[in-house]
Each structure stands twice: as C-alpha cells, then as structure tokens.
Image (cartoon, rainbow, N blue to C red):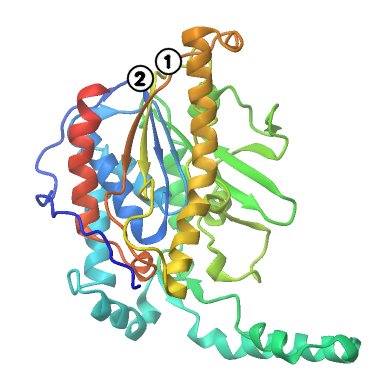
Amino acid sequence: MPLSKVVRKKYQEVGPRTSEPKQEEKPFALALGGLAGNNAHGAGVIEALYRHGKKPKLITCTSGQIRYVHAYLSGLKPGSTLNPYTLLSKHFETAQPFSDFIDPNLNFKLMTWPMQQIRPSVPEFGRDIASNMARSMRDFLRAPATFSMWKEFYRMMPARSLVSQDKILHPDLFKQISDLFNDDSEKGHGIGIIFNAYDFVEGLEYVFMNRKAADLTGHAFGTKSNSREWVRYEAITPDAVRDALRLYEYGFDLPGNLIDGAYLRGIILNEIPHSGNGIKSIVVGRPLTSRWLGDAPSSLTELRDMQTEVNFHGSYLGEKGHIKLINQLIASSQPAPPPDGATHIEFYEVEMDRQRGWWEYVLECEDVFNSAFHHTVIKVVPYV
C-alpha cells in the first residue's frame, strides 16, 4: 500500500519582521534539533520567541540549527537584516524559487549545483567509483576464493553524494558563527550556546559551548562528563562549527574524524539541568512528529524515512526520560530521594505536525515554518 501522507492545514503566513520588541531573559532553555529540510521548524520556534520578547538563558542546537541560531543571535542586534526569517527566505530565493512544487525545485538544484550551498558530488562521482573499483580489485587479488561479485556490485556506489560549498561561497562563515556564539558577555547577546559533533573513529561526542554555557552547566573546557565517559566538553572554534555541519553524505576523505553530532544526539538535553543555574523549563523544537503518520512504508525511500525518524527519536526520549525521572524523585522521593540541588524541569514541546517524506529532507518548507511559529505562540509563549 503506498504511503498516505497526513497533510496538515496551512497556517497564516508569518511574514517579515515589522518591529524589534524588547528582549527579556526568561528562566528557560531552548533545545533545537536539526534535520535537513525540517530546519524550518526550529526557525519558526525561535522566531516566535523573539517576536514575543522571550529570550532564553541557554540554547542547545545540532546540525543545521546552528545556522538558524546564528541568524537569531544576529537578529538581536538593532537594525540587523539577518534573522531566522530572512535566512529562510534567502534559501527559498536561491535554492528553491518554485514555491512548494517539489519536482521543479529538485531539478533546479541539479541544474544550478555549482551555485548551491550543498551540491551533488557530480564531478567527484567518477573518481569515487574508480576508487571503489580499485578497492574491490585489491580484495579479489588478496582472497579470490572468498570474493563475492554480487557483494562488490553493491559496494561500488560511493558514500559521498554531496559536497559542502561553504568554504567557496562563504569562506569566513565558520569563523563568523564561532565569533558570534562566543560573544556572550552582557554587552553581547548574553546567551549560553551549546552544539555537538561526533568522532566516529574514537566513539566520542564533543560538546562545544561558549563561556556562558560552561558557567550555566558546570562543565569546564577540556573535561569529560562524570557519568558519560564518551562525552568531552570543549570551547567553540571555527573548526568545531565546520565539523558539526559535516554530513554523512560528504564522504569521509576530509581531514579529521568529527561529523554532525545530530546523528548521535539530535537534541541536546542532558547538559541543561544544573543546580543554581535558574533554568526552570525547556522549550524543545522537535523537527519530527512523535509517531509515524500515514500508512506503513512500502517503498525503499519510505523505509529510509522511517529509519531516519526512529534513529532521531531514540536519544531524545532517553534524555527526556532521565529528566522526567528526576522530576518524579523531586515530587515523591520514590523510589529514592532526588540528587542534591535537583530542580523540577518543565517541558514545552513543539513537534512537527506533518509527515514529510524522504525527498522533502532536501527542501525547506514555508508551511513548516508558519506551523512551528503559530504552535509556539499558542503552546509556549504564555508559559515561559
């Protein structure tokens, strides 16, 4: 049976900013999960908070949400032309000018790939195929008795399918993001910022944070987690930003072993609760629905979509469950007393309200932005 997507209603268009409301810091943290073409969801959440003057003490973000947090921090400066809405609008203008019609936009990306921020690895394809064929030949010569032509056929397709153009189109982007994230003094934006990257060779997660975030979470640069020995805490640098935006699809021939941390932990929660930091609630921008909407997958692309969603749910539910357990211990002291200094944390979740397919991960959607914005206004703004 083919997948029947659940199509949600269209929400009123948000439109560009028309004012610069005074921002008042509130005792909440904002946790944004990045996921390709669903990044418009987090952009809608953070833009709604700005337009209602709700400033978080701490922001955690992964993957492409790093770009929207950078746009949000830029937009805190009076007169700035960069903010989550304008960043998304620029994406529509330069990468998908055909409104919501998916196929023309996909074709446009392929036709204009040299100018795209992330382009298909067309020039590299032949070289990657040749490299894989050479590997297969070496395996055959090394052990012809166990060589499988059928398996090798499936190993021919290169791992690399995309190439980042950031360094070509925006050579100073990583430094600009790093510098702004670290501008966390009272004269700067004053917000703690956290994001992550994953070392797939050593099996370590690197959690990068500015000085304000280190103070709020109690983690010093150069240290590791006391309870999770695979987690390392480091300062934010341009290289950290670059690594945190490195996708599987870029292949593995680039220097270093760090890749996008969202593959390991799509939404960062564990570091937020800390005795005395004043954070009483967490607003979560979940870039997926909490359940599968529509018929079960019947094609390979639908199956890949389901696998992606399940993978991104796992770590989030584990960390949310840990915080909920502490809340239970605070409320009842059962089955044990809560840790010293533990604080009840309230959750305000804004999750995706529609099932987007595998191909939609390539493209952003203004309806997703508008939906997230209005859901945040209703479900979050009155309570934080």
One can see residue 82 in this view: no
Name above or below for residue 31 compared with residue 82. Answer: above
**Residue drawn 66% across the image and 38% down it:** 231
Inter-mark Cα distance, 1 to 2: 6 Å
Q: Mark 1 belongs to which amino acid? A: Gly
**Residue drawn 26% across the image and 38% down it:** 77
Q: What element carries label 2?
A: loop
Q: Is mark 1 on a helix, strand or loop?
A: loop
Q: Which label number is shown at residue 27?
A: 2
**Residue drawn 36% across the image and 77% down it:** 115
| Residue, disc 1 | 278
Horizontal and vertical percent for residue 62? 47, 47
Q: Earlier along the polypeptide chain: callout 1 or callout 2?
A: 2
Write down the quadrant of residue 120 in the picture: bottom left
Horizontal and vertical percent for residue 133? 71, 90
Q: Which label number is shown at residue 333?
A: none
Name above or below for residue 284 compared with residue 338. Answer: below
Near mark 2 (Cα within 10 A), the count class, few <14, some 14-19 or many ≥20, is some
